[in-house]
Amino acid sequence: MKSDQSTSTKNQHWFVIGGLLAMAAALPAIVATEAYAATRPVADMFTATTANMTPAGVNLRMQILEWQEADVRAEVVATLVAGVDAATPLGKLPTVGYIWPNGSPVGYSVKYAHRAPEPDGGERITLVTDKPLGSYDFKGWSVANSAPKSEAPYSVIELDVNDSGTGSGSFSLVGEVSLDEQAGTVTLKAATPSLLTNVKRETEQQR
């Protein structure tokens, strides 16, 4: 009996030690992600502030490492359409940017990055992240109205910037996402409320 108890105690000790080692191994991975992002050249960068939602006033830094070609964007949209049946999960597709909430050590990987010219000389920027924005926060992010919260396991961010590089935007915290697999595009439906203010394209020196 004593031998069995001794063996059980040793197993418990090794289980705890193994868990601690696993946690320790995971910490550098988080740091390395941010460090790795800092070493890659940034093609474009935008900043914005959350508004008309909780929490308001969160500053976001959006780094675009590369703008995707149409065929690559189509692959991402096909993955979103397939959902859990996708051959390659969204999280395993190439990362083409990052979104960093101010004060958070953890960012969101951008898997879809598209820019389209507007008739007034501005641009419509569309990004898709691997996880919903706010999913790392304990309380989560919300909008105080009757609109149903999006259940999508990712976020779609849209920015409308003028030819001076400023504007506004929103993201799929509430509202519906439209996926056009044939065109390879992702859009927010018109009823989506504006949740991002002070949108600004940063200069090359500020990136």
Image (cartoon, grey):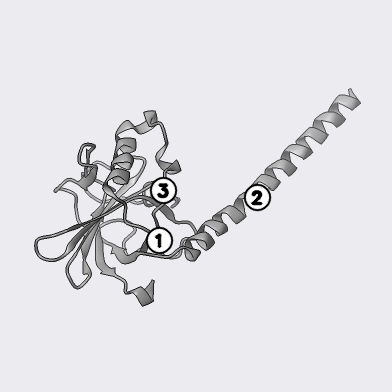
Q: Which residue is mark 1?
A: 101
Decide which of tag 2 and tag 3 comes sooner along the chain: 2
Q: Residue furthest bottom?
A: 205
Circles 1 and 2: CB atoms closer than 8 Å: no
Label 1 crowd (10 A; few <14 / some 14-19 / many >=20): many
Residue 60: image x %, image y %? Answer: 36, 63
Type of amino acid under label 2:
Ala
Q: Which residue is mark 3?
A: 135
- Residue 146 location, quadrant: top left
Question: Residue, x 48% and y 65% (percent of image)?
Answer: 38
Label 2 crowd (10 A; few <14 / some 14-19 / many >=20): few
Distance of label 1 from label 3 (alpha carbons) = 11 Å
Question: Going by the image, does 1 lie left or right of 96?
Answer: right
Residue 63: image x %, image y %? Answer: 37, 62
Question: Residue, x 21% and y 47% (percent of image)?
Answer: 187
Which residue is more in the foreground, 114 or 168? 114
Q: Nearer the viewer, mark 2 or mark 3?
A: 2
* SS at badge 3: loop
Type of amino acid under label 1:
Pro
Distance of label 1 from label 2 (alpha carbons) = 24 Å
* Quarter of the image where the N terminus is located: top right
